[in-house]
Amino acid sequence: MGLLFHDHLHDEFGTWPLAYIPYGGADFGEIAAVARQVGDGDDGDFYRAWVETGDRLVAEAESCATAGHDDSARELFLRASAYYATAYHPLYGSPVDPRLIAAFDKQVAAFDAGLAIGDTPVKAARIPFEDTTLPGYLMPAPGHENSVRPLIVFTNGYDATITDMYFASAVAALRRGYHCLLFDGPGQGEMLYKQKMPMRPDWEVVVRAVIDHATASPIVDPERIVLSGWSLGGYLAPRAASGEHRLAAVVADPGQWSVAAGTRALGAAFGLSPEVLDDPFSMSAQDADTIMAAVQSDPSLRWKIVARGFWVNGVSDIRELFAEMNAYTLDEVGERISCPVVVTAAESDALARGAGTFVDRLGDKVTLIPFIDAEGAGGHCEMGNRTLLNRRVLDRLDELLARTP
């Protein structure tokens, strides 16, 4: 039994929205009600409970909109989008489960419907990128819709979506007076689910297209653009800053200098030699089978490595995954970062263990912000106390940008 849900993975996924409560993305009673409905059920029961809750909120939102209660309608549509986004995490994997697509389509529709309500509606945009387009939303700070302001561009990691970034980060930044731009890149959200585009390590190429799009807007101050990444974005954002120098600052939550180092540590724990870790395709069939047997026997590892890792990276076996992960390091490019770097390090977040490398390699450019378990912020991406994370990071950005009222 976890905090609310019986199944460990269901609890991990189902309690994410607790972090969104201060920003209108969830209500504790609704999450607890979903948990009771799921009970000892399977992934299908988890999916249905969340989707049914989202459907109920959308129906109520439509009734409120018809009655002219716009504030209530907006709130309900947006909260429904977060519940739809929660529904399909256990269904990750290739081939794509049609239920995932159905919930994602409902999520986007509810999110767009909520953003369309208000004095200054926000519309989805398409950001030109190579031979396709990325979905994005440029959101002006309330009360400053026509003013030139600093912009924070938010980038995701392995498994969150634009909806998650909105509640986890953007609402707090918008309240602080920052314009915000949210987007899905390769391996994320729509780009993975519907366009089948896998993740890539050279995030500077992705962000260059996003900054081109942002600077075309008359309300964006081109001298005060921040890039903020969470989870795997704690690698992707600084990687982007190593090659995109129009950024005034970058945030890595948590700071990950080398994702490859974590993968190599996993391989070493299974007895793989440095030579095999350098060239994963030389891994013996016996070693590959041993690793996969251990992965398949652990539901959490199976989801992270097979359902998510293989799918997001567009690979089909452990050798390919290890080889792909070797490219996710700042070792050859990190020193090219020219802007200030804000790095978070939560006490019990395994991905934050290498955050201090940023200080070692970049020195005074780095502000390292620790978070501890005693604050309720020691977990991955400080999800137990997201308001503390947002307050400390935004305070530092205010200082770095010397933002005027």
Image (cartoon, grey):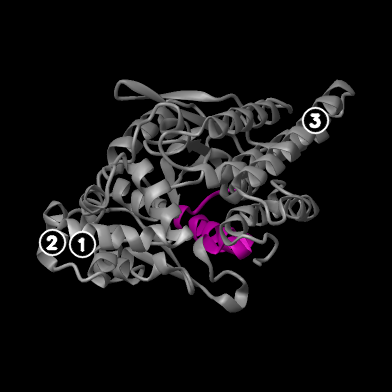
Residue found at the far bottom of this picture:
374
Q: Secondary structure at mark 2?
A: helix
Which residue in the protein does label 3 denote? 61
When the figure is inspected, residue 142 is found, relative to residue 367, above or below; the finding is above
Who comes first in sequence, dot 2 or dot 1?
Answer: 2
Q: Amino acid at mark 2?
A: Val
Residue at (37% x, 53% y) in the render: 305
| Disc 2 to disc 1, C-alpha distance | 10 Å
Q: Main secondary structure of the magenta part?
A: helix
Pointer 2 with pointer 3, Cβ within 8 A: no
Q: Which dot marks residue 287?
A: 1
Question: Quarter holding the N terminus?
Answer: bottom right
Q: Is residue 173 left or right of residue 78?
A: left
Callout 2 touching callout 1 (CB < 8 Å): yes
Residue 175 position in % (x across, y down): 65, 47
Distance between mark 2 and mark 3 Cα atoms: 55 Å
Q: Nearer the viewer, residue 311 or 41?
A: 41
Pinpoint residue 20: horizontal percent, then vertical percent.
Answer: 66, 52
Q: Nearer the viewer, mark 2 or mark 3?
A: 2
Q: Secondary structure at mark 3?
A: helix
Where is mark 2, residue-wise? 276
Q: Which class describes the residues within 10 Å of circle 3: few (<14), some (14-19), or many (20+)?
A: many
Residue positioned 42% across, 47% down in the render: 307
Place of residue 274 in the rendered image (x, y in percent of width and height, measured from the top left): 13, 67
- Residue 372 can be seen in this image: yes
SS at mark 1?
A: helix
The correct choice, above or below, for 6 with respect to 142 in the image is: below
Residue 63 occupies quadrant: top right
Q: Which residues are magenta?
A: 381-405
Q: The disc labelled 1 sits on which kind of residue?
A: Asp
Q: Which tag, 2 or 3, sits closer to the chain's start? A: 3
- What amino acid is at disc 3? Ala
